[in-house]
Image (cartoon, helix red, strand yellow):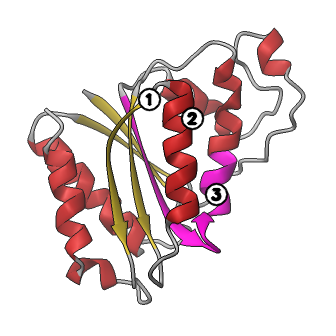
Amino acid sequence: MRILVINASPREGGNTQQLAEAFSRGAEEVGNEIVFLNLRGKKIAGCLGCRYCYAHEGKCVQRDDMQQILKTLDLVDMVVFASPIYWFDMNAQMKAVVDRMYAKGATGFAFNKVALILDAGGEHVFDAAVTQYRLTCNYLNWKNMGIVLAPNMEKIGGASASPAMRQAYELGKSLR
């Protein structure tokens, strides 16, 4: 299976990236191909809501780094959304990607499997992001392959001592 892992962390080597890499190691060990995408440094504007995509076979009117991501979405069997939680939801980098995936609403998605990896500095802050993810899965008939939540990630490197690191690895390894 070809899996796109989208790391939305703006920090190089941050906890989100470490969790996404653990997932990727597990998935590769059982024969999956990983396409690892760091959103850090990418220029992705918010959706304009212009519906140009609906009149042009899923192509977005905006010319930014999302163009390549939209093409990549057509070449994978699964997508993993890995994001830190800021203010009870996925961060702005991931939200921009998710909103711009609206362009694929015109043509449909090539993949139907997804997973979610979230980390946050506190506990009890995941509900909004997980609910949004589950509702999106239901609406688009995506199969949820798993959710990994890593609370109390206040320091860079905190993920290495978290049980979530093993959970992310095992989730990847479960995908045969």
How far separated are the C-alphas under marks 3 and 1? 22 Å
Q: Residue 41 lies in what quarter of the image?
A: bottom right
Q: Are marks 3 and 2 in contact (CB under 8 Å)?
A: no
Which quadrant of the figure contains the N terminus? top left
Magenta residues?
A: 78-97
Is residue 93 visible to the viewer in this orientation of the structure?
A: yes
Of the numbered discs 3 and 1, the one sitting upstream in the chain is: 3
Of the numbered discs 3 and 2, the one sitting upstream in the chain is: 2
Residue mark closest to the camera, 1 vs 2: 1
Q: Is residue 2 toward the left or the right of residue 11 in the image?
A: left
Percent across and percent down for residue 28 are 17, 42
Q: Which mark is residue 69?
A: 2
Residue drawn 19% across and 44% down? Answer: 27
Of the numbered discs 1 and 2, the one sitting upstream in the chain is: 2
How far separated are the C-alphas under marks 1 and 2? 18 Å
Residue drawn 33% across and 35% down? Answer: 3
Q: Which residue is most to the right?
A: 50
Question: Badge 1 is on which residue?
Answer: 142
Q: Judging from the image, what secondary structure is the residue with disc 3 in? A: helix
Percent across and percent down for residue 168 are 24, 59
The amino acid at mark 2 is Ile
Towards the viewer: 136 or 169: 136
Question: Badge 3 is on which residue?
Answer: 93
The amino acid at mark 1 is Trp
Q: Which mark is residue 27?
A: none
Q: Is residue 150 above or below residue 77?
A: below
The amino acid at mark 3 is Gln
